Amino acid sequence: MDHNIGSADRIVRLIGGAVLIAIGVASLVGLLGFGTVAGVGAVLIGAVFLGTALTRICLVYRILGVETTDSS
């Protein structure tokens, strides 16, 4: 599969994923009052963001025909 995530999109996903995972873990250990379901949800979404940033492939982008790479 060809990459469909560009540099700026990748950085946003890396930072956003790390922040979501940190918020989710903090919620799961009781530091934040968001609850268990929100904590697990934040960790899962953060993991997807990190995974797509590392592989530079987003299946949702592929389905919608979106490409944020710099190549023409």
Image: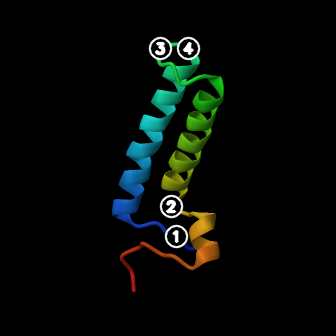
On the rendered structure, is 67 left or right of 64? left
Is residue 34 or residue 6 the one in the foreground?
A: 34
Residue designated by label 4:
29
Note whether 51 is above or below 23 in the view shown: below
Mark 4 crowdedness (10 Å alpha carbons): few <14, some 14-19, many ≥20: few
Note whether 29 is above or below 64 in the view shown: above
| Separation of residues labelled 1 and 2 (CA atoms) | 5 Å
Residue designated by label 1:
3
Describe the element under mark 1 as helix, strand or loop: loop
N-terminal-most mark, 1 or 2: 1
Mark 3 crowdedness (10 Å alpha carbons): few <14, some 14-19, many ≥20: few
Question: Which amino acid does the dot numbered 1 rest on?
Answer: His
| Separation of residues labelled 3 and 1 (CA atoms) | 37 Å
Residue 1 visible (yes or no) = no
Residue designated by label 2:
56
Q: Residue at x 39, y 86 (%)?
A: 72
Q: Which of the numbered marks, if any, corresponds to residue 31?
A: 3
Question: Which amino acid does the dot numbered 4 rest on?
Answer: Val
N-terminal-most mark, 4 or 2: 4
